[in-house]
Image (cartoon, helix red, strand yellow):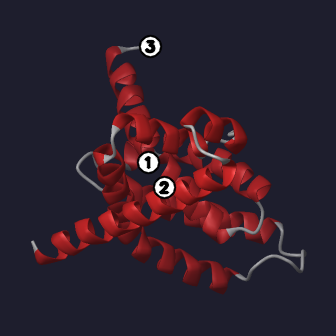
Amino acid sequence: MSPDQASRHRAFLRQFTANEAAIRAFVRRLVPARADADDIMQEVSVVLWEKFDTFRGDGDFRAWSFGVARFEVLAWLRDKGRDRLVLSEKAVERFGEEAEFSEHRLERQREALERCIDAVAPAQRDLLLRAYEPDARIVSLARESGRSETGFYQWLYRMRKLLLDCIRRNLAKEEWS
């Protein structure tokens, strides 16, 4: 691999990994099943790599990738056109426009959530994050924290409420800045 190719490869990987979750969420909003979204994401990844030379380095990679993803969803729809459970192209276009419009707001909310979680005391933050891991066992976490299972669920409720209030304060500050 030449130095130029290696540099191009690194640039793509940086952009793609930084935006993959948002691209996947965008695709997921446009198709009915997670398995379909996974298939489409594979195609989106390939197309993004193949067309990366057409991407302007100073452009918005996320917006560009959403456009590519929308076309891939439309191509998937054309292939699945005989299936009655598939959305129309017009509906996908509409959902895509709304998803792109709301992406900025969602990104601000995710950033505010990260700031708020960072503000939680480390021991509580660790326990909170572990409660939302896929294989979390609430009974074990409750015992570890010295709470009953019911008490732990109440603690989680209070933590979510505190985080929500914190997010709202952060977003309100941004609007007034």
Front in this rendered view, residue 82 or 144: 144
Front in this rendered view, residue 52 or 101: 101
- In the picture, the quarter occupied by the C terminus is bottom left
Q: Nearer the viewer, mark 1 or mark 3?
A: 1
Image spot of residue 47 (x, y percent): 57, 47
Identify residue for label 1. Answer: 19
Lateral position of residue 118 relative to residue 127, left or right: left
Q: Sequence-wise, which precedes: disc 1 or disc 3?
A: 3
Lateral position of residue 30 relative to residue 86, left or right: left
Q: Is residue 25 shown above or below 124?
A: below
Identify residue for label 2. Answer: 22
**Residue shown at 43%/41% (left/top)?**
124
Identify residue for label 3. Answer: 1
Residue located farthest toward the left when viewing the structure as drawn: 177
Q: Is residue 113 shown above or below 123?
A: below
Quadrant of residue 46 in the image? top right
Q: Amino acid at mark 3?
A: Met
Image spot of residue 158 (x, y percent): 47, 61
Q: Are marks 1 and 2 in contact (CB under 8 Å)?
A: yes
